[in-house]
Image (cartoon, helix red, strand yellow):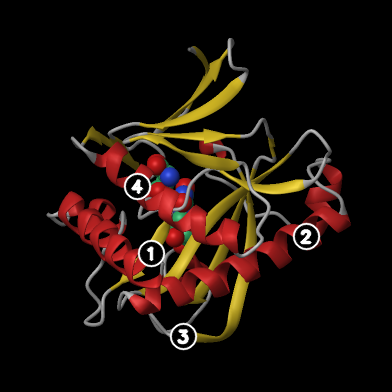
Amino acid sequence: MKLVAEGKTKKVLFDEGARKYFLEFKDDITAFNMVKHEKMKGKGELNCGITAILFEVLKKNGIPMAYVKKIDEKTIEVRDVKMIPVEVVVRNRAYGSFLKRFNFKEGEEFKKPLVEFFFKDDEKNDPQLTRELFEFLDIANEIEIKKMKAYALKINEILKEIFKKIDIVLVDFKIEFGKNNDNNIILADEIDPDSCRLWGKNGEMYDKERYRKGLDGVMEHYNEILNRLKKSARLTI
Ligand code: TMP
Ligand code: ASP
């Protein structure tokens, strides 16, 4: 296996014989663009398991995606994709960087979901993108932006439903898209507690915000999400 790329929490691998790509989930956890960074044993497996379950449901619901299938405890097979350097954030409630910019009550539910785009650049702290910047920086055209927004909203509806079934509120999440060989926009990357805000009924946090805030039990809470999703997936099959 050839290492194609390595990020903070994942590796992209290429099997030259089979000509297949794989995403391997690492045990690293980071926050505030590597200001905090450590390894948590088993994290790769938890995020891989959660991403695979969520992607399977999204696939069944017709979302075009790079995800092919889960290979082993920390690896998924993915299609060849050229990543678009954009973080697409969907928010159902006011939290995180939204609260730093706008005067809403913490946790307040929005009348409708908000979709925001940020340029992927750790050094510059992922600046927010406008339509003008998309065009100016030649990141994506109008049709592609509209497609990403429409997919993001559809994904939000599906994810909200999945999490509601396991008594979790989907506060917000981040997804990334890429282009396949036919130049079509497809969902890529991961969806797991690293990239979502997930609240229990009493407001308990089941996601990476625990690590950002220095709360204990990060892996226990990720594990709880995986176990509830597994149980729920068994019931619906
Ligand atoms: P934000 O409120 O900090 O902008 O985060 C919005 C969502 O995006 C939240 O669910 C956490 C997720 N996220 C990432 O996945 N990666 C990141 O680098 C950041 C800043 C947020
Ligand atoms: N994803 C960024 C990091 O890992 C920022 C964050 O999630 O807080 O450093």
Q: Which residue is mark 4?
A: 49
Q: Secondary structure at mark 2?
A: helix
Q: In the image as oriented, which residue stretches furthest toward the left?
A: 216
- Is the CB–ligand 1 distance for label 1 below 8 Å? yes
Q: Where is mark 3, residue-wise?
A: 109
Q: Nearer the viewer, mark 3 or mark 4?
A: 4
Badge number at residue 147: 2
Q: Which of the numbered marks, if any, corresponds to residue 197?
A: 1
Q: What kind of residue is marked 3? A: Glu
Q: CA distance from mark 3 to mark 4?
A: 29 Å
What's the residue at 67%, 30% (across, down)? Answer: 80
- Is residue 201 toward the left or the right of residue 233 in the image? left
Q: Position of residue 166 (x, y in %)?
A: 31, 74
Residue that appears at 36% across and 52% down? 50
Q: How far is the residue under mark 1 from the one under mark 3?
A: 13 Å
Answer whether labels 2 and 1 touch (C-beta < 8 Å).
no
Please, is residue 232 above or below residue 59 in the view?
A: below
Q: Amino acid at mark 1?
A: Arg
Q: CA distance from mark 1 to mark 4?
A: 17 Å
Can you tell which quarter of the image residue 217 is in? bottom left
The image position of residue 88, as x and y in percent, is 61, 56
